[in-house]
Image: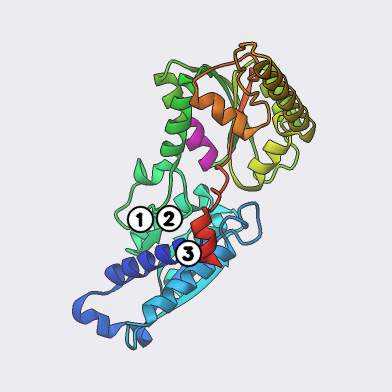
Amino acid sequence: MASTLSGLGRVAIAAALALSASGAALAEIPNRTIKIGVLSDFSGPFADQVGKGSLVGAQLAAEDFAKGAGDLKVEIVAADHQNKPDLGLSIARRWIEQDGVAAIADLANSGVGLAVNGYLHEKNRAMLASSTATSDLTGKFCQPTTVQWTLDTWALGSAIGRTITNMGGKTWFFISFEYALGRALQRDATQAIAKAGGIVVGSLSHPLGVADFGSYLLQAQASGAHVIALADTGADASAGRRGSPRYSSRSSTSTRSASTSRRASFSRKRSTGIRTKRRAPSPGASPSGWAAACRRRIRPASIPRRLLICAPPRRPTRSRATRSWLK
């Protein structure tokens, strides 16, 4: 993760140099120092995803840059926007107009990113949106001073909406953030769902920082939709997953027991020479079972009528060679 963030930081430094100075003007940089601001969520629901990790990545990039930059230095400053667009814009103004910051990076929270985006264009300063996911940054609010170095809601919404609809999830219900990210992700996914022949039967929006999704999930289930989609991320997405019966420990245990019994029964019949057709694994709460069912393009009766589509995939397991190298 740190190496990725370090790479993003190097891009920010290059963008800052390109916009703030060129040619002979490099010699006129005040104190021979370029300031980069990391504007992120250090205390809210996105702090584990970005925050201090983004700051450390930028600092590592500055250290790498210093090795071949001679007397030209890069100073990293940071601030917590607390997921408030007005506060984020206020910090950006102070950095640019008073502190001489040349570029601002990270900008987790799409509302904050969009607020700062236009201001930095006015001031001809670079914005590296390494944590801003709304596709509006490359759409109706696109600016030549902004680089969206990350995934966006069009990529996420289109891929998931099209694929799940083609698999049979024709009706959808969205539970979305009530700010820029949730609106953009629901909009982009809805377009893909419609093109694939599906329909959104309802939606609910929720504020940032919801701990209990019980009431939202009950309303979504009552809609009868095949798919309940969480158009959010961070701590809110985790809370939504915990509230879903699909992820309960009781469901996981019963699924494993049922699968074990079926395997034992199949083995006994095979040993006695009785030919039988192996049943598909139940994907109720088992990621491996669901993946197997998807690969074989089957839809057994054991698949829940309502699927919960949410959050990023788990980090892949390291290979044996990688583990040996890390030792």
Q: Where residue 60 sits: x, y (%)?
A: 47, 73
Q: Does 2 appear above or below 26?
A: above
Mark 1 and mark 3: Cα distance apart in space: 14 Å
Query: Which residue: 63% across, 20% down?
Result: 303
- Please tell me how crowded label 2 is: few (under 14), some (14-19), or many (20+) other residues with Cα within 10 Å: many
Q: Quadrant of residue 166?
A: top left
- Is residue 187 inside the magenta stretch? yes
- Report the residue marked by disc 3: 92
- Is residue 318 inside the magenta stretch? no
Q: Where residue 132 sits: x, y (%)?
A: 47, 50
Q: Where residue 172 sits: x, y (%)?
A: 56, 21
The three-letter code of the residue at mark 1 reads Thr
* Quadrant position of the C terminus in the picture: bottom right
Mark 1 and mark 2: Cα distance apart in space: 7 Å
The residues colored magenta run 180-188
User: Can residue 107 be seen here?
Assistant: no
Do labels 1 and 2 touch, CB within 8 Å?
yes
Q: Does 275 appear above or below 237?
A: above
The earlier-in-sequence mark between 3 and 2 is 3
Q: Does 125 appear above or below 237?
A: below
| Element marked by disc 3 | helix
Nearest the camera: 312 or 121?
Answer: 312
Query: Which residue: 77% across, 35% down?
Result: 249
- Report the residue marked by disc 1: 146
- Report the residue marked by disc 2: 129
Mark 3 and mark 2: Cα distance apart in space: 14 Å
In the rendered view, does 266 fall on the left or right side of 54?
right
Q: Quadrant of residue 300?
A: top right
